[in-house]
Image: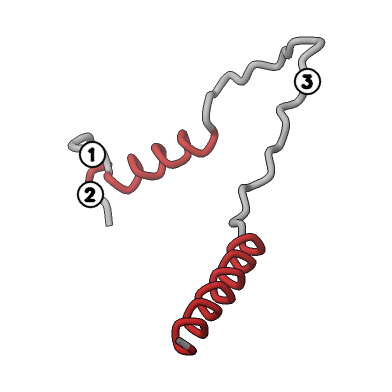
Amino acid sequence: MSTSSTGGEPDPERMLSAALRAQATGNATPETHEAPESEPPRRSEPRRLPVFGLLLYALLLGIVVGGVAGAVSLL
């Protein structure tokens, strides 16, 4: 419980609440005017890992290494 209502130190719970509220609302005076001919920002797709290319590379490498190992074992 808070006993600081008599004028001592500010209540830490109230200070935290006020800080979080201010952070959540952002700027208290948002700008309402936009440039009339501005385009909305493009949403870039997240970069994907090259899974298909990596699997293909691993398959081809396995075939080549297997062929070399087979050729060496026949000698």
Query: Where in the figure is residue 42, as x and y percent of width and height?
Result: 73, 31
Tell me whether the residue at label 3 lies in contact with that at label 1, contact meaning CB atoms closer than 8 angstroms.
no
Q: In the rendering, which numbered label is found on residue 3?
A: 2
Give 30 or 62, whichever is nearer the viewer: 62
Secondary structure at badge 3 equals: loop
| Badge 2 density bin: few <14, some 14–19, many ≥20, Cα 10 Å | few
Q: How many angstroms separate mark 2 from mark 1 (CA)?
A: 7 Å
Left or right: where does residue 69 sit relative to residue 13? right
- Residue type at mark 3 is Glu
- Residue under the point 53% across and 24% down: 27
Tell me whether the residue at label 2 lies in contact with that at label 1, contact meaning CB atoms closer than 8 angstroms.
yes
Q: How many angstroms separate mark 3 from mark 1 (CA)?
A: 54 Å
Please identify, in this view, whether the residue under mark 3 or under mark 1 is nearer the observer.
3
The residue that label 3 is drawn on is: 39
Which label's residue is closer to the chain start, 3 or 1?
1
Q: How many angstroms separate mark 3 from mark 2 (CA)?
A: 53 Å
| Badge 3 density bin: few <14, some 14–19, many ≥20, Cα 10 Å | few
- Residue under the point 55% across and 79% down: 67
Which label's residue is closer to the chain start, 3 or 2?
2
Position of residue 11 relative to residue 40, above or below, is below
In which quadrant of the rendered image does the C terminus lie?
Answer: bottom left
Please identify, in this view, whether the residue under mark 3 or under mark 2 is nearer the observer.
3
In which quadrant of the rendered image does the N terminus lie?
Answer: bottom left
- Residue type at mark 2 is Thr
| Badge 1 density bin: few <14, some 14–19, many ≥20, Cα 10 Å | few
Give 24 or 60, whichever is nearer the viewer: 60
Secondary structure at badge 1 equals: helix
Q: Residue furthest right?
A: 37
The residue that label 1 is drawn on is: 6
